[in-house]
Image (cartoon, helix red, strand yellow):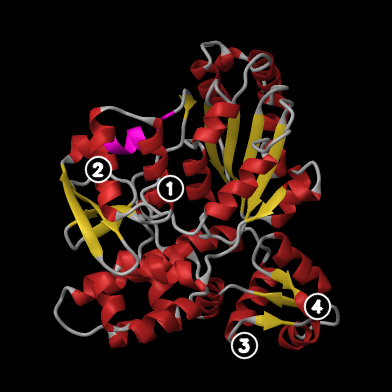
Amino acid sequence: MPSQRDLKFAIERLLIHAGAEDRHILQQAMLAGRLTHSEGDNSVAIGGDLSGSVVATGDRAQIINLQLGNASYDQLRELIFPKPPGLVPPFPDLLFIGREAAMTDVKALLGMKPGASSQSHRAVVRGWPGVGKTTLVSVLSRDPDVNEVYPDGVLWTSLDQNPQLMSIIAAWGRTLGRDDFLRIATPQEAATQLAATLHQKRMLLIVDDVWDAGHAAYFLQAQGPQCGLLFTTRLPEVAQAIAQKEETIYALPVLTEEDAVKLMRLLAREVVDQYPGECRELIRDLECLPLALHVAARLLRVESKLGWGVSELLAEIRAGAKLIAAQAPADRAESGRIPSVQALLQKSTDMLNEHTRECFAFLGAFAPKPATFDLAAMKAVWEVDDPKPVVRTLAGHGLLEPVAGGRFQMHALLVAHARSLCDE
């Protein structure tokens, strides 16, 4: 592992003359959370364009603080993770910690392993809302292994629930040098034309945030024979519908507890140092979900700057209501506005019919810690003869996950959301 001084020298050399060895060292440091960007006490992020300093950290102490202005930091970030050709997702503004194994696994599914063929590869990343699917593929798009296997670049889009498919395909077409896609009559014909344009290309196609397998079908049709295709979705039923086979689905887990503690400490160092036990309990209550950790750390950091203790806030966050009412991270902005955490979660529950949504809400009201249920418990709570149809729907929408012993789990953040629905 390179020392803090090694990282400092690697940064200085990279800013003068980009070298592969220094780039690799700094990539690993960023992905491990050892190289961060800080604006005084107000923010710590892997990306962003705020002025401040690049901080190289050890396990416990901040050692190197290298002052960089906006332009220099932007230059450094682009040098560490060069932007490939094509249409690339924005570089994530959130810290990206504890995902080395996930990166390796997803890259293997996309053909980045010894002996892999040059034929097309497909993969689907699925997971809880807020587990970091979008952040993962954003970093992956700039990974040097991706650039080597797919030298013609990346084509990315984010669909959401009501995508403008013709506009998306047309944007991909323009990136490839064609301006005629908007004159094509249907998305299906546009996808056929896109496939022809991609026929000789080696590109990674990334389709983020899929809510409908029918939308994904156009990109399956457009995939060139030497292109990789990566989807993300929070919906297991969508993942199953669009995957070629079960082994091409990667379930992105929450962070390990130690990585979650590391992330929280980078985001709210003074609070974690002052309240180590309480913060670890909070992390456990939040079940190591990256979105919840980022929001909780921001609330704690702001509260601590007011000059009083944060014990009361820690308790309120652990209870859940304070967290879901809070503003989501800035990278979740939609149409120029940053939604609340609850608004992000409500995208999933708004898709349910009234009866299923009520069943979901009732689970929140009666949830134990950790929130796991068997069929008998759900039958009793819902007062139904057969709970299986509702369980299938909730599991298909990523609101319940099957666990060992015939039980089903609801993540703590979703429990808080379910409880809020009971109060409406």
Between tags 3 and 4, which lies in front? 4
- Disc 4 marks which residue? 406
**Among numbered discs 1 and 4, the one appearing first in the sequence:** 1
The relative height of residue 416 versus residue 238 in the rendered view (above or below) is below
Q: Specify the amino acid type for callout 1.
A: Gln
Label annotation for residue 48: none
**Among numbered discs 1 and 3, the one appearing first in the sequence:** 1
How much space separates mark 1 and mark 2, taking CA atoms?
A: 15 Å
In the image, which residues are magenta? 76-83
Q: In which quadrant is the N terminus drawn? A: bottom left
Measuring from the top left, give residue 12's x and y in whole percent: 22, 38
| 57 with respect to 340 (left or right) | left
Name the chief secondary structure element in magenta. Answer: helix
Secondary structure type for disc 4: helix
Outermost residue on the right side: it is 385
Query: Label 4 neighbourhood size at 10 Å, few (<14), some (14-19), many (20+)?
Result: few
Label annotation for residue 9: 2
Q: Specify the amino acid type for callout 3.
A: Phe
Query: Label 2 neighbourhood size at 10 Å, few (<14), some (14-19), many (20+)?
Result: few
- Disc 1 marks which residue? 28
Q: Are marks 1 and 3 in contact (CB under 8 Å)?
A: no
Secondary structure type for disc 1: helix
How much space separates mark 3 and mark 2, taking CA atoms?
A: 55 Å
- Disc 3 marks which residue? 366
- Please indicate, yes or no, whether residue 182 appears anywhere in the rendered image: yes
- Please indicate, yes or no, whether residue 81 appears anywhere in the rendered image: no
**Among numbered discs 1 and 2, the one appearing first in the sequence:** 2
Between tags 1 and 3, which lies in front? 1
Secondary structure type for disc 2: helix
